[in-house]
Amino acid sequence: MGFRKDFIWGAATASYQIEGAAFEDGKGLSVWDRFSHEPDKVFDGHNGDVACDHYHRYESDVQLMKEIGLKAYRFSISWPRVLPEGKGAVNQKGLDFYNRLIDQLLKNDIRPFVTLFHWDYPSALQALGAWENPDSVKWFEEYAALCARTFGDRVKDFITFNEPQCFIGLGYTIGVHAPGLKLPDSSLVPMSHHVLKSHGVATRALRSLVPDVRVGYAPCGDPCMPASLSPEDIEAARKAYFTVPENQGWAFNAAWWSDPAMLGCYPESGLKRLEQFLPKGWQEDLKVIHQPLDFYGQNIYNGNYFRAADNEQGFEKLPHPVGCPKTAIQWPITPEALYWGPYFLYERYKTPFIMTENGMSAHDAVSLDGKVHDPNRQDFLNRYLLAFKQAAEDGVDIRGYFHWSLMDNYEWAQGYRERFGLIHVDYETQKRILKDSAYWYRGVIESNGECL
Ligand code: NOJ
């Protein structure tokens, strides 16, 4: 058994994190262009003005992808690069960049997966109220249709949104990401509804404009894992995963952001408290939000353990074991998250599953021998991929895996402090070096995961 023959082995990036060229060729500003230049928002004042300079180096970057043996590459379009004001006038030079990148990928037999929105929201639309404005749905539809019409002759795999939990949760709820706001639920809940509706209209636009298109979604939400294999603990974890918390944690929850898109309803546990804030007519909108998807994506880095408990909810969260291994960014290493996440999500949403992101930051450095030895990442990947493979063997319809990230890049509020790449980037010289893990991943791809 193991992974399917046509398994999609890839790596992922996002526009603001790698492109640079923030003020070039007619690009408009995004909320990140502004936020990263505000004092004390980002580690050491880092910004994405140049980042990995991928805008100018995409050709050689595609060659590095080829060297790793990637079958697919997931990247995002910068909305203000192609629509500087977010709507209306199109920036042809911006479209040309993505056209060149796509052509280069196809020439090298690398399948492009395009994410429409990975957080760099047009500043011009932020000034109009962003996702809180009901018109945000039609702005996103216009943008999605432009991407469909421009790239759809060559790109067949599209992802509408990346981690709505994070751009709403971190950007508008706790304010540590752009645009740095802390809004009340009365604003946040309508925003979440408009994002979901935007997902629906974009999916519809992609279907009508792109022949043979495959559309997916890439939310997140740390999986809840059972503390033991007892049926009670498994049920406790399942319940915890899909229960919307009563505090602001709702904005980070898996079910709130997936049930409407995948099942056509909001989770009851969330509605109890949040229904009062949903915009009028929300029930009708569910028909638009709930579009059939070709794959359900999910970004997973770690999970939390739960066990059955004699309390109102029927479950309780356990702390990670003392001394639990952690990545450089201090996230716990919990390989079973790649088993239980896909397992519970497939059980609930019954849609082919793609791991749209997974990986780790490590303290990578260039050694005296000129190479980058990152045994921690290799071990991490080995363990996580084994768990993922087990999920496939236990019946989850798993179609692909995208490593985060192709190359070290701008880790949002952490700036360039965290290195998640398979490729090491020296930001002073823009020199790239394939890390040991990249060569190891090549072997995984070549053997279709048999070497794990
Ligand atoms: C989630 C995000 O999609 C991506 O942009 C980020 O860099 C990684 N995970 C790591 O935090």
Image (spheres, helix red, strand yellow):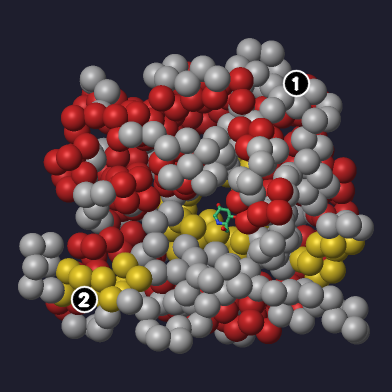
Mark 2 highlights which residue? 307
Can residue 79 be spotted in the picture?
Answer: no
Which quarter of the rendered image does ligand 1 occupy? bottom right
Q: Using the rendered view, name the quadrant where residue 116 is placed.
A: top right
Q: Nearer the viewer, residue 268 or 148?
A: 268
Residue 273: x, y in percent? Answer: 17, 40
The yes-or-no answer for disc 1 within 8 Å of ligand 1 is: no
Q: Residue at x 60, y 83 (%)?
A: 379
Q: Secondary structure at mark 2?
A: strand
Quick one: label 2, few (<14), some, or many (20+) residues within 10 Å? many
Above or below for 160 versus 143: below
The quarter holding residue 185 reads top left
At x 84%, y 68%, the residue is 433
Q: Position of residue 267 (x, y in %)?
A: 21, 45
Q: What's under tag 2, amino acid-wise? A: Arg
Task: Give neighbour class at mark 1: few <14, some 14-19, many 20+ (Cα, 10 Å).
Answer: some
Q: How many marks?
A: 2
Q: Is residue 148 left or right of residue 269?
A: right
Quadrant showing the C terminus:
bottom right
Query: Does 376 appear above or below 165?
Result: below
> How far from the left and from the top, in percent, is residue 313?
12, 62
Q: Is residue 114 above or below residue 413?
A: above
Q: Which residue is mark 1?
A: 91
Task: Say if 374 sits above or below 170 in the image.
Answer: below
Q: Can residue 188 be seen in this snapshot?
A: yes
Q: Secondary structure at mark 1?
A: loop
Q: CA distance from mark 1 to mark 2?
A: 53 Å
Apparent side of residue 415 relative to residue 284 in the rendered image (left or right): right
- Can you give x and y, in whole percent of width and height, for residue 203 in the image? 46, 33
Amino acid at pointer 1: Asn
Please identify, in this view, whether the residue under mark 1 or under mark 2 is nearer the observer: 2
Comes first in the chain, label 1 or label 2: 1
